[in-house]
Image: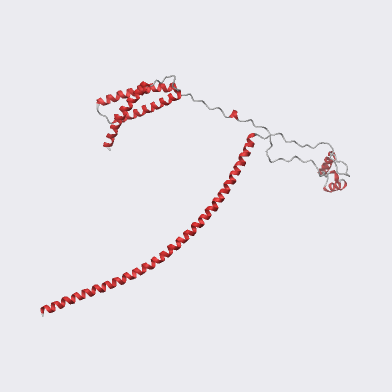
């Protein structure tokens, strides 16, 4: 860690020296108040130079933390004063060429004024007599009012008598004027934003229908693919089961063969040992006799 820190400090020293020289040359050679240079380009250059000065300050702080020599500290102090002087020059130029922000125009005045819908016609009952059917006398509104008043004041028996005596006094004609039907479609005089909303809704409905159709097709395609994959998986499962059964049988056969081979090997070794013992005993008997 210490060697890495020393190596980094060496790199920072070299980079700091080169960067300070480059910045000093840039500030000395650049004419920040040149009339031929556009303000946006000048502002970009000043901002770039300020970032480089900030990085140079960071390198200077890193180098000063690991430095103990008084001469080096004095030299770094001079570099700090130089950086402060360059930063003051560039900051003043940056404030001079900084572009003025323009506020965006308000959106509310550009919106169209809403168009009020035309008022609906109001149907009122007139005092003119109601036309009667052919063969009947015209019925006036006074007769209807008197019949309704009698219906409210008389008893049920009197009401039935009045109905039997003059049934046409309270019956309304079959063809009364009706109020005009309200159309569900948007009239041409409707506001523009309502028409735009209706067009957007129709377009969204068409897109949703198309998306639903595409999703249905995708579902059918994926269902078919899953069926094919299911068939392949079932075939693989069947093959694995057959292989498992075959391996189980082979395992049992190998186990039995191993037990038999161990028994045969033991008998052979025992026979060899018995033969050797018999040979040795025979040799000693012949030798000593």
Q: How many marks?
A: 0
Q: Residue furthest bottom?
A: 289
> x, y (%) of residue 27?
36, 22
User: Is residue 72 toward the left or the right of residue 129 in the image?
Assistant: left
Quadrant for residue 188, please give it: top right
Q: Residue furthest front?
A: 36
User: Is residue 135 toward the left or the right of residue 111 in the image?
Assistant: right
Residue lying at 43% horizontally and 64% vertically, measured from the top left: 241
Residue lying at 37% horizontally and 28% vertically, measured from the top left: 52
Q: Residue furthest left?
A: 288
Residue lying at 50% horizontally and 57% vertically, measured from the top left: 228
Q: Is residue 123 above or below residue 82?
A: below
> x, y (%) of residue 183?
70, 40
> x, y (%) of residue 242?
43, 65
Which quadrant, please, contains the N terminus?
A: top left
User: Is residue 72 toward the left or the right of residue 97 in the image?
Assistant: left
159 and 31: which is toward the camera:
31
> x, y (%) of residue 216?
56, 50
């Amino acid at each position: 860690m210490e060697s890495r820190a020393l190596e980094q400090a060496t790199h920072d020293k070299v980079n700091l020296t080169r960067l300070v020289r480059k910045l000093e040359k840039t500030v000395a050679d650049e004419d920040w108040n040149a009339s031929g240079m556009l303000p946006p380009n000048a502002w970009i250059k000043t901002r770039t130079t300020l970032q480089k000065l900030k990085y140079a300050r960071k390198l200077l702080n890193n180098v000063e933390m690991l430095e103990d020599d008084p001469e080096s500290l004095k030299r770094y102090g001079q570099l700090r004063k130089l950086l402060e002087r360059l930063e003051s020059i560039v900051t003043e130029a940056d404030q001079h060429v900084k572009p003025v922000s323009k506020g965006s125009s308000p959106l509310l005045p550009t919106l169209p004024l809403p168009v009020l819908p035309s008022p609906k016609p109001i149907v009122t009952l007139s005092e003119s007599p109601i036309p009667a059917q052919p063969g009947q006398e015209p019925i006036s509104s006074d007769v209807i009012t008197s019949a309704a008043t009698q219906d409210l004041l008389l008893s049920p028996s009197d009401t039935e008598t009045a109905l039997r005596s003059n049934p046409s006094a309270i019956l309304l004609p079959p063809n009364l004027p009706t109020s005009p039907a309200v159309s569900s479609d948007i009239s041409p005089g409707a506001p523009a934003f309502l028409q735009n909303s209706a067009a957007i809704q129709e377009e969204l409905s068409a897109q949703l229908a198309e998306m639903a159709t595409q999703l249905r097709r995708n579902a059918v395609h994926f269902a078919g693919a899953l069926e094919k994959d299911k068939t392949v998986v079932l075939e693989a499962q069947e093959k694995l089961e057959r292989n498992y059964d075959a391996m189980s049988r082979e395992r049992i056969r190998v186990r039995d063969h191993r037990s038999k081979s161990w028994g045969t090997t033991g008998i052979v070794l025992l026979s060899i040992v018995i033969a050797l013992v018999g040979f040795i005993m025979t040799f000693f008997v012949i030798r000593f006799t």
